[in-house]
Image (cartoon, coloured by chain):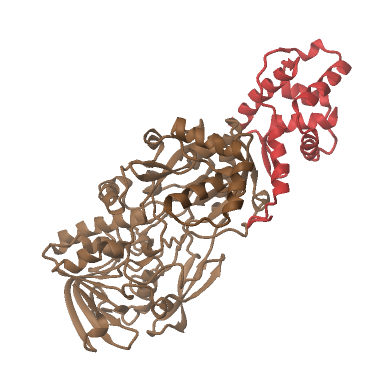
Chain colours: A brown, B red
């Protein structure tokens, strides 16, 4: 059932066994697991079915530290959450990401990759990808040749793409609507968490809509699933019983904010771009796109004392090439749509006929894809960030339209974060040189001793702000994602990641949500 | 045309010279350096370098960048000894082969040098330096 909170009476009270706050990847995957069970579930979604500027403005906040995206646009606040604008990149965390690495401060999850393996398997069909094959072995399933890189230094990795990116709201809306034990309440923003007097149990959450309506939801258990920034914000703002906010007796909520620093670290020059263009780009395996890349081996990470990181080949196509024009003409003809600048395109094909002929031959005779000549080739590096208590989310005095304190995001990077990018880039450059595939030029900023380039950005991955640890002094939630010291409050999403690896987080967010569902079924089912 | 990274076509074409200047062909003929008189050795090496470097200006530019690291320019004989050990090339293809072997070894063992941002094998940089020293 889907309910619009604005149609309920002011002061309405709803009851459920399980209250899930937030209907993004984590909240929806979790709720979906309860369809058809005896557990009554109430999902509270702040937004509606579509993007709404006034609702989205509730995400406004300040940024400090490293340059960061506008907080009101780097995540989405309506059914499906940020899956409404994600690109579909999927990859599990590596085994080593879960381990305690002495050279990475506060590394080590309380759980291991093996604890998530079955949930990663279960997550595959949700994203319409698979099999669970994301490393060197995946070369065997695609029509590409692995470069002769030294795997002991630079191991092969793959991302799979959810094709097209699954928008959780669109995909699961009907299932949730049809389920008799699920109530999805839209336009219901959680503005408070009510605790018993001892602060050991959540009794209800306070709900408000932009039209001024108030209400509350009581449940046996509550799950915060609002994303890496909002999860911390809601806990910090719920300070009526716990002055520093719920789960924050040790001052950790909101700290350890991590991203995946994302940079172009250099350009590639080669006599023959073909081996790179053919092998290091997107390939399909049973209709699932596989993108190859590379990462430092575990031994290299240990020996050089660096974080985990990924590096992948990319290129900017030469739009003046004959093949580029030929493809535009071909797609226009195939789709029956007019091609802009038809005469110019034809001339472009004719004046670069050698390039076009080579591609047509490859396609017809060898069954290979067209490869547009590159204008330039570069590498993109997306790396792990070291957990840093000074990289954090804080409440600021300014309030949003619902009366909630806004946040300041202070994203901080460390010397280790930068060194990791530098070392991995150099390893990649050395392997390109050793195999004589190409030579590599470092970006100007990497030729200096410190600092980052102007193109540094995050990846819209918000992690670590309610980190998982067995010891409450080092984490906000325990290994079951339960807030330390609170018997019935759980957190879902990447805010629980104690470390973030380099893998895009959505796949792990869903695997953890499925694991949490199993735990909650045992406890409340 | 300038893109978001500040690359210009001209800049990229000049960078392309880095690759064009690096030898890649195979060869076998090699002998010991001690078999050569010093003057003959230098003259012979000059000829070989002329033969293998398509873009001598780019090679020189890199060679100069490499030599700027030294307060006093190194003796070319020392550079050649370090580069070729006891296998002095008798022809251009042998030179290319030897440098190729050294390149694989240098990159594999992390003996690289950053020149104007380019990550090159030390042997490649030494070869470029010889175009300046000889």
Q: Is residue A473 visible?
A: no
Residue A286, image x, y percentages: 33, 41
Q: Residue at x 18, y 79 (%)?
A: A14
Q: Is residue B114 left or right of residue A160?
A: right
Q: Is residue A367 left or right of residue B9?
A: left
Q: Is residue A9 above or below residue B47?
A: below
Q: Residue furthest front?
A: A343
Toward which corner of the image does residue B72 lie, by quadrant?
Answer: top right
Q: Residue furthest top?
A: B35
Q: Is residue A410 left or right of residue A196?
A: right
- Of residue B97 and residue B115, the one placed in the foreground of this image is B97
Residue B35, image x, y percentages: 80, 10
Q: Report the number of discs.
A: 0
Q: Residue at x 30, y 56 (%)?
A: A510
Quarter the N terminus of chain B occupies = bottom right
Q: Is residue A64 visible?
A: yes
Q: Is residue A359 above or below residue B94?
A: below
Toward which corner of the image does residue B26 lie, by quadrant?
Answer: top right
Q: Residue at x 55, y 70 (%)?
A: A64
Q: Is residue A151 above or below residue A395?
A: above
Residue A176, image x, y percentages: 21, 66
- Of residue A121 and residue A377, the one placed in the foreground of this image is A377
Q: Is residue A363 above or below residue A252?
A: above
Q: Is residue A144 left or right of residue A321?
A: left
Residue B74, image x, y percentages: 82, 31
Q: Residue at x 73, y 47 (%)?
A: B10
Q: Residue furthest right?
A: B39
Quarter the C terminus of chain B occupies = top right
């Amino acid at each position: 059932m889907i309910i619009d909170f604005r149609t309920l009476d002011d002061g309405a009270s709803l009851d459920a066994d399980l209250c899930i706050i937030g209907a993004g990847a984590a909240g929806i995957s979790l709720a979906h697991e309860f369809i058809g069970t005896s557990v009554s579930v109430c999902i509270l979604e702040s937004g509606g079915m579509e993007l709404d500027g006034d609702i989205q403005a509730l995400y406004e906040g300040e940024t400090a530290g490293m340059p960061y995206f506008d907080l009101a646009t780097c995540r989405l606040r309506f059914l499906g959450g940020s899956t409404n604008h994600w690109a579909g990149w999927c990859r599990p965390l590596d085994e080593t990401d879960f381990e305690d690495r002495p050279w990475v401060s506060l590394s080590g999850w309380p759980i291991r990759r093996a604890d998530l393996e079955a949930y990663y398997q279960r997550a595959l069909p949700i994203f319409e990808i698979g099999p669970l094959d994301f490393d060197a072995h995946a070369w065997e399933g695609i029509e590409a040749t692995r470069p002769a890189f030294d795997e002991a230094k630079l191991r092969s990795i793959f991302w799979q793409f959810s094709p097209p990116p699954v928008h959780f709201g669109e995909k699961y809306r009907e299932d949730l609507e049809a389920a008799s034990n699920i109530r999805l309440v839209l336009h219901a923003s959680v503005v408070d968490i009510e605790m018993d007097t001892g602060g050991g149990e959540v009794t209800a959450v306070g709900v408000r809509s932009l039209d001024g309506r108030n209400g509350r939801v009581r449940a046996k258990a509550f799950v915060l699933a609002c994303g890496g920034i909002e999860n911390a914000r809601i806990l910090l703002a719920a300070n009526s019983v716990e002055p520093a906010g719920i789960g924050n007796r040790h001052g950790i909520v909101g700290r350890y904010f991590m991203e995946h620093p994302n940079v172009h670290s250099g350009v590639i020059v080669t006599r023959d771009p073909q081996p790179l263009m053919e092998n290091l780009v997107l390939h399909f395996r049973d209709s699932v796109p596989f993108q190859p890349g590379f990462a430092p081996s575990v031994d290299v990470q240990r020996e050089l004392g660096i974080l985990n990181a990924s590096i992948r080949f990319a290129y900017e196509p030469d739009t003046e090439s004959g093949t580029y024009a030929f493809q535009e003409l071909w797609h226009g003809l195939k789709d029956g749509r007019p091609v802009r600048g038809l005469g110019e395109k034809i001339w472009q094909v004719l004046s670069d006929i050698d390039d076009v002929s080579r591609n047509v031959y490859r396609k017809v005779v060898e069954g290979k894809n067209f490869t547009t000549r590159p204008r330039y080739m570069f590498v993109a590096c997306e790396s792990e960030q070291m957990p840093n208590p000074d990289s954090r989310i804080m409440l600021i005095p300014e309030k949003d339209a619902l009366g909630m304190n806004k946040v300041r995001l202070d994203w901080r990077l460390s010397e280790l974060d930068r060194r990791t990018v530098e070392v991995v880039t150099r390893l990649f450059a050395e392997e390109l040189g050793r195999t004589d595939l190409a030579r590599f030029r470092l970006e100007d900023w990497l030729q200096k001793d410190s600092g980052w380039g102007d193109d540094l950005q995050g990846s819209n991955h918000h992690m670590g702000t309610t980190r998982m640890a067995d010891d409450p002094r080092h984490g906000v939630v325990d290994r079951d994602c339960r807030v330390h010291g609170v018997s019935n409050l759980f957190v879902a999403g990447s805010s629980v990641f104690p470390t973030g690896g380099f893998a895009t987080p959505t796949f792990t967010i869903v695997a953890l949500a499925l694991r949490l569902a199993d735990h909650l079924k045992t406890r409340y089912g | 045309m300038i893109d978001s990274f500040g690359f210009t076509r001209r800049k990229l074409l000049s960078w392309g010279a880095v690759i064009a200047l690096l030898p890649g062909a195979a060869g076998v003929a090699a002998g010991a350096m001690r078999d050569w008189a010093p003057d003959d050795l230098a003259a012979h090496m000059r000829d070989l370098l002329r033969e293998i470097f398509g873009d001598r200006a780019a090679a020189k530019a890199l060679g100069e960048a490499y030599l700027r690291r030294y307060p006093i320019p190194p003796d070319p004989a020392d550079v050649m000894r370090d580069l070729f050990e006891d296998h002095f090339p008798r022809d251009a293809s042998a030179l290319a082969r030897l440098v190729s072997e050294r390149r694989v070894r240098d990159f594999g063992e992390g003996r690289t040098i950053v020149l104007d941002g380019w990550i090159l094998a030390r042997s490649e940089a030494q070869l470029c330096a010889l175009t300046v020293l000889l």
